[in-house]
């Protein structure tokens, strides 16, 4: 048997290839939309990809299942446990090779067997796959758990309600998760656990960064496994879950049906330092993202653009804050153009239409002048607040704000700024988050909307370090 692990750091998303060396077949579990890496592995190892296994309808990335089914003529295996529930039922086009499965079904790949285990909770239709290498043992080696069991955490059950608007599904999902955990506790403690995500994913609240674990270790150490009472477990699981990125609702719809094929996508154009073009775009209903560092953006930027720096959090923030209904353009290092396009494809933002180089900011400054925003110390922010010259806005998660915040601070989670900014006061605001990174993005969003804003250097950590008032 052959097993390979793939990891997309931008989305903290794991996928897997399992191959049977006897038959030369391979299966992919929860593949991403960037399928070239799978095809390259298959060619290198001499495998033919024949099967694609989906644990659930993903909310945080575009599944590559349809793309693989088309390119490799492989069959998609998906859960039938959501039948009759519109929020949990796949609706793939009948032209796609597909096979629905239920709890107890087996999928054969030569000597390798995948046993389907129904593990609802994160989603109502969620399934996991027990892997047995028949050439070595009749006992299962491990389980592909998707968004059921993570290292140190389990999948959040509230996404259907918060992201897709399915009423009362959060509590029901938490109760289902309790029973799913109870179901697997009695399995072999040596069972390997291969999760669908690692640290940084918004599909849980405290995922570990280790790529794999064992069932026995999770039973002993995972906080979600320490409950015998369903009510207490439900309260624990639903508490302090972060606001889901806005794009999750879009992903649920895309992955129910299967994403459009990348071959049909038009290529983004390159505009270099075309000031006239960007000026015209600024008058249209489009989004222009400046992906330079927050330091560079704060010192000089083109008015009307928003700043989401190209770093490890880039894809998540794009999906959380950028509209899927508008064309999107980027100011970015040309070396990053292809990576940014891949990142956009990964979350279904197929409206990327063009790129400008960073030098356009300097050229724009020469011809029209640029804007900037001030980064101020917590002490300066406090003094200005006392004098009534600004209000302070906390853009952290709800549970962070409730635990402790700057005295007299207003609050709005950063995810809500694009749609609810008009609810904020129209006078000068100083923004903060935990360390200053999130608030830099938020500052650019509000500036693009015409607000006078400053960013508090070092965020709440520095505010507390300087012993300024909190409540």
Image: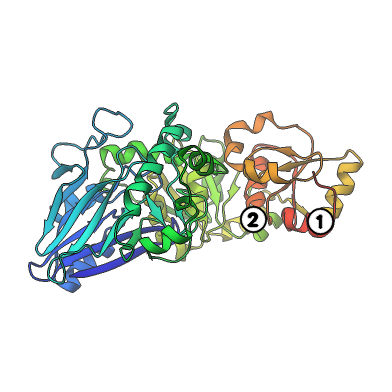
Task: Name the quadrant containing residue 138.
Answer: bottom left
In the rendered image, the vertical position of residue 339 relative to residue 385, given as above or below: below
- Residue at 48% across, 34% down: 162
In the rendered image, the vertical position of residue 274 relative to residue 258, given as above or below: below
Disc 1 on helix, strand or loop? loop
Q: Which residue is mark 1?
A: 377
Q: CA distance from mark 1 to mark 2?
A: 14 Å
Residue 367 relative to residue 71: left or right = right
Q: Which image quarter holds the N terminus?
A: bottom left
Please tell me which of labels 1 and 2 falls first in the chain.
1
Residue 282 relative to residue 202: left or right = right
**Place of residue 364 in the rendered image (x, y in percent of width and height, measured from the top left):** 63, 53
**Place of residue 374 in the rendered image (x, y in percent of width and height, measured from the top left):** 76, 52
Q: Nearer the viewer, residue 42 or 51?
A: 51
**Place of residue 297 in the rendered image (x, y in percent of width and height, measured from the top left):** 65, 56
**Place of residue 106 in the rendered image (x, y in percent of width and height, measured from the top left):** 14, 51
Q: Nearer the viewer, residue 298 or 189?
A: 189
Task: Name the quadrant containing residue 391.
Answer: top right
- Residue at 31% across, 34% down: 88
Q: Quick one: label 2, few (<14), some, or many (20+) residues within 10 Å?
A: some
Q: Which residue is mark 2?
A: 437
């Amino acid at each position: 048997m052959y097993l390979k692990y793939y990891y997309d750091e931008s989305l903290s998303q794991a996928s897997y290839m399992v191959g049977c060396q006897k038959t030369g077949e391979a299966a992919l579990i929860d593949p991403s939309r960037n399928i070239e890496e799978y095809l390259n592995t298959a060619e290198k190892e001499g495998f033919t990809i024949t099967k694609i296994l989906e644990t659930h309808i993903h909310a945080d990335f575009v599944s590559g299942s349809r793309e693989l089914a088309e390119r490799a003529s492989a069959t998609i295996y998906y859960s039938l446990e959501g039948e009759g529930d519109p929020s949990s039922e796949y609706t793939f086009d009948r032209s796609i090779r597909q096979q629905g499965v239920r709890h107890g079904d087996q999928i054969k790949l030569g000597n390798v067997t995948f046993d389907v285990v129904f593990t609802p909770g994160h989603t109502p239709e969620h399934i996991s796959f027990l892997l047995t290498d028949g050439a070595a043992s009749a006992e299962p080696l491990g389980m592909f758990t998707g968004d059921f069991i993570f290292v140190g955490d389990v999948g959040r059950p509230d996404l259907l309600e918060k992201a897709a608007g399915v009423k009362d599904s959060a509590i029901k999902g938490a109760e289902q998760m309790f029973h799913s955990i109870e179901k697997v506790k009695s399995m072999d403690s040596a069972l390997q656990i291969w999760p669908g995500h690692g640290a940084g994913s918004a599909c849980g609240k405290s995922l570990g960064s280790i790529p794999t674990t064992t069932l026995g270790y999770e039973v002993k150490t995972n906080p979600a496994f320490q409950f015998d009472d369903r009510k207490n477990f439900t309260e624990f699981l639903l508490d302090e879950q972060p606001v889901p990125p806005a794009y999750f609702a879009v992903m649920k719809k895309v992955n129910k049906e299967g994403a459009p094929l990348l071959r049909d996508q038009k290529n983004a154009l390159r505009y270099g330092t075309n000031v006239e073009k960007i000026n015209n775009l600024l008058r249209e209903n489009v989004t222009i993202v400046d992906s330079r560092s927050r330091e560079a953006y704060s010192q000089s930027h083109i008015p009307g653009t928003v700043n989401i720096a190209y770093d490890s959090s880039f894809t998540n923030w794009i999906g959380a804050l950028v509209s899927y209904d508008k064309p999107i353009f980027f100011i970015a290092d040309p070396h990053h153009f292809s990576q940014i396009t891949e990142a956009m494809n990964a979350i279904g933002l197929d409206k990327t239409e063009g790129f400008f180089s960073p030098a356009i900011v300097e050229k724009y400054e020469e011809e029209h002048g640029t804007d900037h925003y001030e980064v101020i110390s917590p002490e300066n922010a406090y003094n200005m607040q006392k004098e009534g010259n600004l209000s302070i806005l906390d853009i952290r998660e709800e549970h962070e704000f409730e635990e402790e915040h700057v005295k007299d601070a207003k609050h709005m989670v950063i995810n809500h700024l694009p749609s609810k900014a008009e609810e904020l006061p129209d006078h000068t605001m100083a923004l903060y988050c935990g360390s200053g990174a999130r608030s830099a993005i938020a500052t650019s969003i509000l500036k693009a909307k015409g607000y006078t804003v400053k960013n508090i250097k070092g965020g709440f950590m520095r505010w507390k370090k300087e012993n300024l008032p909190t409540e």
